[in-house]
Image (spheres, rainbow, N blue to C red):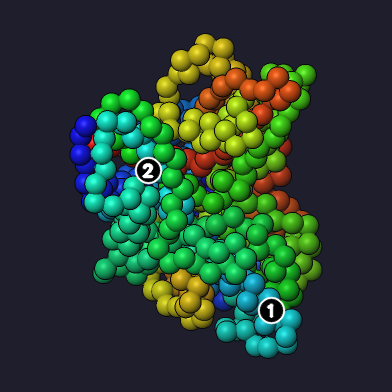
Amino acid sequence: MAEPIRLKTPLRDEDVAGLKSGDRVLISGVVYTGRDAAHRRLFDLLKEGKALPFDIRGQIIYYVGPTPAKPGRVLGSAGPTTSYRMDAYAPSLIERGLKGMIGKGMRSDSVKKAMAKYKAVYFAATGGAGALLAKRVKKAQVIAYEDLGPEAIRRLEVEDLPVIVINDIYGNDLYIEGEKKYRISA
Amino acid sequence: MREIDVKLITEKVRDLCIEANTDLGEDVIQALDRAMKTEDSPLGVEILKELKENARIGREEKVPICQDTGFAVVFVELGQDVHLSGGGLREAIEEGVRQGYRDGYLRKSVCHPFTRANTGDNTPAIIHTEVVPGEKVRITVAPKGGGSENMSRVVMLTPSEGIEGIKRFVVQRVKESGSNPCPPTIVGVGIGGTFEQTALLAKKSLLRPLGSRNPDPELDGLESAILKEINQLGIGPQGLGGRTTSLAVHILMMPCHIASLPLAVNIQCHAQRHKEIVI
């Protein structure tokens, strides 16, 4: 396997254009957490024409609801949650400059179209490897919606967070291609 | 008649919640080892290694292997010669869950269906109590994550669909679930009973250790046949392509109504967490 690509956030259009489905990537810098309830709130803010709690341009949202940090630790376990539940909200965020999403599982056609149109990429992290992934998080701070508990928006500083490109801006999808490659027809 | 103070039950449930979430069973680790040997995809092998390493971290550092520490599903087998004193059984279990999720730094993942407001302490628990002969209490805590639970289904097949219909539905369910439930999965299957009973059978089938055989030879053969078809789908670890889509298929079956053929598929990610104790 090829060596992983190292990426620093925020992402520029040329960073995103250089990524291909199947690339292994190590992300360093800031990523924001957000899952079901937070997305609902972000979406409502956009509908009302209000500002989001952070500047979304060039940023990556990690679909994760971590466990509480044990004393002396930055964060608890922090693996990805299933992404399709954010599909209804993602295109609006991508249109406003979101450049990356980290989750797991297939995206809808409308998300894939928005990614191609506005140049954004979808990464998967290993679902169920929350203890391992948490070791790459160096700082964590709740920046919005503290009342949502695990679903609050956190600003994470990560170092070499390991992910794989699933959907690039060229219409490729690793889930579809991977399955096709290994399928045995009955 | 044996007397047991429910405080003991609270204490044990607390410990089981923490242990189940941090210490993945050896049977799962061994199943991952076996899968590494048969997986053709290099990326798939890497992922299986990651899951094993993740389990090691969980066990050694006493942290949850997955951030989704689940809904607390608790199975109780209550000996009919036991007298519980000092409070109600349900409240004792709920208190154990409350303490376990607080003291173990586990995520609280239970909310109001409409407002989505978190209940804050991971209660209520889902409790299945069965009264059995004897004077012992067996408690099994099996935290269930949402991602794989969302991919589960119950269907009422017609009797004419038979075994072929069962196979077709289970394999199709795994295919449609794709990468969502964090493959490699364990597929729990309930056959027969009624609408609600078949779902419970599917869930209970997940408690069987991985690598063990179904005691019913016919079901054992059906498990192998379905697993073979599933692992030809190509979904692979994390859905990135490969041979290891599921580690096992487990079936529990009971008689059903002459009009029905109930079937439930309860998908479980590799974090097949369950710990039990006999008091």
Q: Depth-wise, is mark 2 or mark 1 nearer the camera? A: 2
Say which quadrant the N terminus of chain B sits in. Answer: top left
- Rendered location of residue B126, percent (x, y): 46, 48
- Rendered location of residue A98, percent (x, y): 65, 74
Give the amino acid at mark 2: Val
For residue A60, above or below residue A185: below
Q: Give the secondary structure at mark 2.
A: strand
Q: Chain of mark 2?
A: B
The quadrant holding residue A69 is bottom left
Mark 2–mark 1 distance (CA, rounded to whole Å):
38 Å
Q: Nearer the viewer, residue A111 or B39?
A: A111
Local packing at callout 2 (Cα closer than 10 Å; few below 14, some 14-19, many 20+) is: many
Q: Chain of mark 1?
A: A
Q: Give the secondary structure at mark 1.
A: helix
Q: Single out the residue that lies furthest toward the top.
A: B217
- Left or right position of A67 against A116: left
Q: For the point 67% across and 52% down, which residue is it?
A: A106
Q: For the point 26% across and 35% down, which residue is it?
A: B82
The quadrant holding residue A76 is bottom left
Residue A19 shows up from this direction: no
Say which quadrant the C terminus of chain B sits in. Answer: top left
- Rendered location of residue B177, percent (x, y): 65, 43
Using the image, tell me which numbered label, if any, was put on residue B141: 2
Local packing at callout 1 (Cα closer than 10 Å; few below 14, some 14-19, many 20+) is: some
Q: For the point 26% across and 43% down, which residue is it?
A: B84
- Left or right position of A173 against B89: right
Give the amino acid at mark 1: Asp
Q: Which residue is mark 1?
A: A44
Q: Nearer the viewer, residue B21 or A95?
A: B21
For residue B165, above or below residue B200: above
